Image: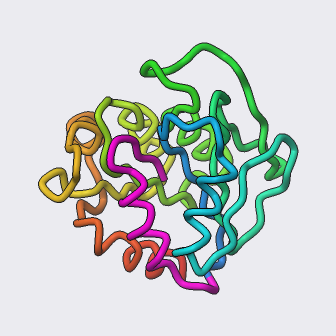
Amino acid sequence: MGCSAGGLKALYTVLGGLDEKLPVPVIVVIHSGSDDVGMLCGLLSKISRLPVEEAVERRRLRPGCVFVAPTGYHLYIERDLRFALSVDDKVCFVRPSIDVLFESAADVFREHLVAVVMTGSNEDGAAGLKAARGRGAIAIVQDPEDAEVPAMPEAALKLAGADFCAPLTGIARLINELCRR
């Protein structure tokens, strides 16, 4: 899932509603502006029923865990289900980029991926969501009218569309249902 401006509040709502026995990993890119991802993980841990930790180079993805992309690095998922970090050029003026994560995750998980775009002030996530949907992923986009900053969900809907367009309070329920299938 990815978010930008207004993202901390959005993550509190969504992560707080996820099933504590979620059978999949959750990977988050947030444009937080903070260099201290550890502090962000600590804040998210207070609301999440799942453990929250920073995504680290070569760490294996684990079901039932939330991984947060580190500041200043693009986050990739490799075929062996490990993370890879990169300092390649910024995408949509940001690093980490939601587009980069979604494209990488879609290459690995294809139709087993649920990609979520929430509140934010740029277009990051739209191209990645389009690529993910092209590989069979399910797309959830926060209803722009419900978003603190609607630019990111609007861009995602315009470019990629969505399988589900939901208010923030309905996103966790959707993820829980989709992951039980």
Q: Position of residue 73 (x, y in %)?
A: 67, 29
Name the foreground residue: 128 vs 181. 128
Report the number of discs. 0
Instruction: Give the residue drawn at x 33%, y 30%.
Output: 123
Residue 135 horizontal side relative to residue 156, left or right: right
Residue 134 horizontal side relative to residue 110, left or right: left
Q: Position of residue 168 (x, y in %)?
A: 29, 66
Specify whether residue 2 is painted magenta: yes
Image position of 129 with respect to 9: above or below: above
Q: Magenta segment, which residues?
A: 1-21
Give the colouring mode of the picture.
rainbow
Dividing the picture into quarters, in which one does residue 86 lie? top right
Image position of 130 with respect to 67: above or below: above
Instruction: Give the residue drawn at x 52%, y 75%.
Output: 47
Dividing the picture into quarters, in which one does residue 112 lie? bottom right
Name the foreground residue: 160 vs 64. 64
Instruction: Give the residue drawn at x 43%, y 67%.
Output: 12
Q: Position of residue 14 (x, y in %)?
A: 42, 69
Q: Identify the residue at the far left of this view.
A: 145
Image position of 128 with respect to 109: above or below: above
Name the foreground residue: 86 vs 38. 38
Instruction: Give the residue drawn at x 44%, y 61%.
Output: 11
Specify whether residue 85 is painted magenta: no
Q: Position of residue 138 (x, y in %)?
A: 42, 58
